[in-house]
Amino acid sequence: MNKLKKIYTFFLLYAFCFALFAPAQSQNVISGEKGKKINELANAYYREGLLNGTILVAERGKVIYKRGLGFANMEFKVPNEPNTKFRVASISKSIAAILAMRLVEQGKLSLDAKVSDYLPDYRKDVADKVTVRHLLSHTSGIPDTLTRPGLWEREIRDPFTPQELLARYSNGTLEFEPGTKFKYGTMAYVLLSLIIEKATGRTFEQAQREEVLEPLEMRDTGIEGASPIVVRNEQGRSMLKGKSPIIERMATGYMKVNNEYSRSPFMDMTHAYAGGTIYSTVEDLFRLDRALYNDKFISKQTREKMFTPVLSDTGLGWNTRYLSFSDLQQPFLNIVDEPRMLREAPADFKVVYKLGDLWGYSGVFARLPNEEHTIAVLVNVNSRAIFFELETIRVTQGLMNILYDKPYFTPRERTFAEIIERQGFEKAVEIFKQLKQKEPANPVIREAEVNALGYEILGQKKFALAIDVFKFNVEAYPKSANSYDSLAETYLGTGEKELALKLYKKALEVDPNYPNAKAAAEIVKKLEADAKVNSSN
């Protein structure tokens, strides 16, 4: 009997210790009628395979919805929870911008200081022109490292220190005069992280943690370390370069193509540093949101500088839009389209936001400061390898509509690509037409999605199907120059030059200034010249 008592006592102590030291579970929240509507919308997106991640919505500073959907790890069926950690990609830039502005308030950093004031090894004729303000607002003209040739095929897997990136990419010529144009990029934020280190005498990670994360108790937010790789030392022995501690409750990133899931390609996050290497949770993003109403953390004057657009809709690390309720009734909220048109205030509401997107992860962090509403959406499945995952933005649009008591769109039945894969192209077109007739304002697809799908099929050398998809896009979106251009390019590749010429001309007729117009005009000249030579022969 005494032995049984000892065993029983041991298990009680074990259970107590496990409860004491086990990670705290984060509770779901579904509050009020709006919380129920949000839950219905989130479930609809999840059922259609369009959402796998975590959502938090706050109304007037109070959380009314907080829940994970799907799996943080599909192999072991680990569910997403409100405290699941995700790579937040370019949302890192907003968090880094808050650090920079805190340092400005402390007098440790100046927005008008030049890069050369902090980084004397950077190319001087460039560094003397570019300021910290230019780096924060994407108006520096410095070429972006993440668009350099060969990066995504080879180098993205290898860890780099900021100093190594600086030494390797500090000789680039400016693409435009600083302050005259906007061009989004990450290299500017790599430079910003080095400037912060120089200004504070701390590593970027230490400064971010001590100035922002710890004061706000953002315990589930941090910076990913360099992933270890095997290298050879001078004696020819194998050794590990880089260090990447295990991050508890970190979601695995996945890609989804034609309803098939796979792990996202590996990439080392040190290529981005301040521009994309932060991980966080929706709960921590909400803590950050609340702090941005606190003058003791960061002053109102500094916040206004940070959120006021410099060029386009971009401020210092953040985007700001003034939207009308009619914008929310459009099939796709125009927060990523080019050219980025800025609606002047006053409008129905103001949104301060940041998008994040990379292989396997996507996110939206949106603040509606006039009403103190907050939306945080973090996902760990990308349905297609194109930047700014459209479904994440559509979810956010639906959440905004619910917050403002406006009608919202429900997700459509599967993606166009999945219908083609399962039932064929003709059936996909039939379903599209039925859905459009049933609910004209809520299209099943967007022109850009169809275009991306066409190029994906073209890459598989399925030329006939690619032509069908591009033809369908022309029919569905007859006012899109891009749809004509893509079909023209495909015909040119298959040798059907007369059809290509006709479609290139149509694209230029629809929009003489679309992004590929200059190249299209040159192709038209060449095709017409070739046609004259052939006719004379």
Image (cartoon, grey):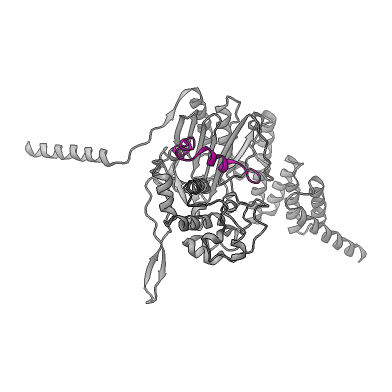
- List x then y, in percent, for residue 328: 63, 31
Identify the residue at the far bottom of this view.
235
Residue 440: image location, x then y, percent: 69, 31
60 lies above or below 84: above
Give x and y (percent) for residue 195: 50, 57
The answer to whether 238 is drawn above or below residue 267 in the figure is below
For the point 91% across and 62% down, which residue is it? 535
Left or right: residue 151 compared with residue 209? right
Which residue is the extreme one toward the front? 107
Q: Is residue 137 visible?
A: yes
Where the N terminus falls, by quadrant?
Answer: top left
* Residue 48 shows in the view: no
Give the vertical position of 241 relative to 26 (above or below): below
**Which image quadrant is residue 18 in?**
top left
**Left or right side of 132 for 283:** left
Viewer-side residue, 493 vs 420: 493
Q: Residue furthest toward the left? A: 2
Q: Which region is colored magenta?
A: 285-313
Residue drawn at the location 67% of the way across and 57% of the way down: 177
Where is residue 87 shown, x and y percent of the image? 47, 48
> Is residue 332 found inside the magenta-colored segment of the image?
no
39 horizontally vs 469: left or right: left
**Viewer-proximal residue among 294 and 89:** 294
Q: Quadrant of the C terminus?
A: bottom right
Task: Give the image quarter of residue 237.
Answer: bottom left
Q: How many tags in the picture?
A: 0
